[in-house]
Image (tube, rainbow, N blue to C red):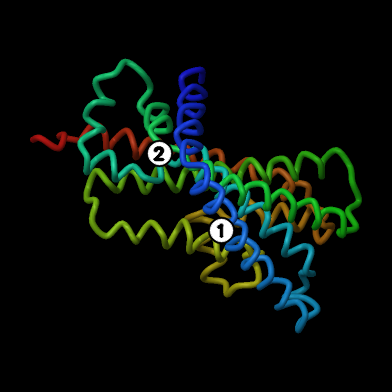
Amino acid sequence: MKIYLKALSLHLKSELEYRSSFIISFLSQILVFFSYYFIIIAMFSKFSNIKGFSMYEVLLCFSIIQFGFAFNEVFARGIDKFDDLIVQGNFDRLLLRPKNIIIQVLCSQSDFVKLSRLIQALIVMVIALINLNINWNIYRVFCLIFMIISGIVIFFGIFILAASYCFITVQGLEVRNVFTDGGKQMAQYPIGVFKKGFVYFFTFIIPYAFVNYYPLLYFVGKSNNIIFGFSPLIVLLYLVPCIVVFYLGIRHYNSVGS
């Protein structure tokens, strides 16, 4: 962890060497994020709810997914850009070092420009919570915490799977965008508003529904099933096969020079 924090400080120092560029990029990310936010606001100006979900319930769902995605873009950028390590031959050097491979990959890159999205997601989350009539208790506090953590974990797992795909090919990596950017766009709404096929896929294949749909039902009082409140913990199990697949890929990696 000490090495990782040191790497983060170096990346931040590097990005701040070009402060004008950093500030412009930071501000542009704010505009991009709020375009998503205003689309939801505009939609609810025409509709009072979406399959029973109010605007602030959708905004809570939206903020949790956006927070998880932005967190990984900032602090797990090395995993997201793993194909660069393969193409440039730098992954071979990581294998020679006596440190955990995933930690080394995490240390390879970061993107502090995306902190703007992380902060904005927190602001939207606070706005949603203030305007929702939540019957607070200890279980709902834990439910909210689990939702936020699982949002981070699920995107980290997907990034790991996408990195594993790079051991097969670095071509056609647009397929990962289906599950990262594409999945993010779908999961920022309660999964239950979509058709059953999508609900099943994003419950049992990629468990977005356990991040901010089933726990959301409990959190806002649409369900009294306390199991829903703890369902985000299932996402932690999803991370295990993702890491296993990544290390299987390493075992079959022959290096760029072979």
Q: CA distance from mark 2 to mark 1?
A: 22 Å
* Residue at image mark 2: 78
| x 62%, y 65%: residue | 191
Q: Are marks 2 and 1 in contact (CB under 8 Å)?
A: no
Q: Which is in the foreground here, disc 2 or disc 1?
A: 1
User: For the view shown, which residue lies furthest in the left direction?
Assistant: 258
| x 29%, y 45%: residue | 83
User: For the view shown, which residue lies furthest in the front direction?
Assistant: 20
Quarter of the C terminus within the rendering: top left
Q: Residues within 10 Å of mark 1 (few under 14, many from 20)?
A: few
| x 64%, y 40%: residue | 149
Using the rendered view, name the quadrant where residue 152 is placed: top right
Q: Position of residue 56 (x, y in %)?
A: 79, 64
Q: Residues within 10 Å of mark 2 (few under 14, many from 20)?
A: many
Amino acid carrying label 1: it is Ser
Q: Which is nearer the eye, 235 or 171? A: 171
Q: Position of residue 171 (x, y in %)?
A: 23, 56
Check residue 28 in the rendering and tell me which mark sits there, or answer none. 1
Using the rendered view, name the quadrant where residue 59 is placed: bottom right
Q: Position of residue 120 (x, y in %)?
A: 68, 52
Q: Which is nearer the eye, 122 or 174? A: 122
Left or right, 194 with reference to 111: right
Amino acid carrying label 2: it is Gly
Relative height, residue 63 to residue 150 (above, below): below
Q: Which is nearer the eye, 155 or 93? A: 93
Left or right, 134 with reference to 11: right
